[in-house]
Image (cartoon, rainbow, N blue to C red):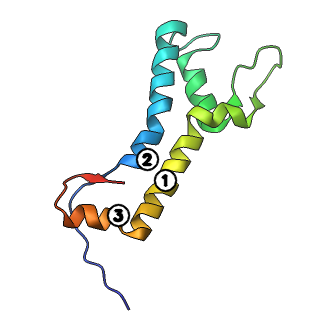
Amino acid sequence: MRFHRRSNKMTIPLAVVAGMVPLAIGTWQHGQFNGWTGSGDTAMDYFVRSLTGFSPNAAGYGGSTFNIRNMKHGALPIVVGMIAHKVAGRIGINGALARAGIPFIRI
């Protein structure tokens, strides 16, 4: 049976954070050009659409519609980042970074 020594240090998983960058940039741009809330294609609509795939204010449809392409700047990069973080942990990259004394950063 393996025993792992847990560290109380905080680490930042770069792959997951990198997956959140397209969502943050797109939300910011929509907020600057289309407004943060209200009617039309606002920042909040973009944020919800990017994470869930549903368009909350679909024009002409009278309700929300789902499209997997809506998630290409939100949920999909975050999930890919989580998978990359898990794989990096399995093959030992994160342990090597910790042993090298690099603070805070993990893949």
Residue 73, disc: none
**Residue under label 1:** 82
Residue at horizontal 26 percent and vertical 61 percent from the top = 97
- Percent from the top left, x then y, of residue 51? 59, 36
Q: Secondary structure at mark 2?
A: helix
- Could you give the CA–CA distance between mark 3 and mark 2, rounded to whole angstroms? 15 Å
Residues at circles 2 and 1 in contact by the CB criterion of under 8 Å: yes
Whether residue 81 sits left or right of residue 94 in the image: it is: right
Could you tell me how far apart the alpha carbons at marks 1 and 3 are, in whole angstroms?
14 Å
Q: Is residue 48 positioned above or below 61 on the image?
A: below
In depth, the one of 3 and 64 nearer the eye is: 3
Question: Label 3, on which residue?
Answer: 93
Q: Which mark is residue 16?
A: 2
| Quarter of the figure with the C terminus | bottom left
Graded by Cα atoms within 10 Å as few (under 14), some (14 to 19) or many (20 or more), the crowding at tag 2 reads many
In primary-sequence order, the first of circles 2 and 1 is 2
Choose the circle earlier in sequence order: 1 or 3.
Answer: 1
What type is the residue that disc 2 sits on? Val
- Classify residue 54 by image quadrant: top right
When asked about the image quadrant of residue 57, the answer is top right
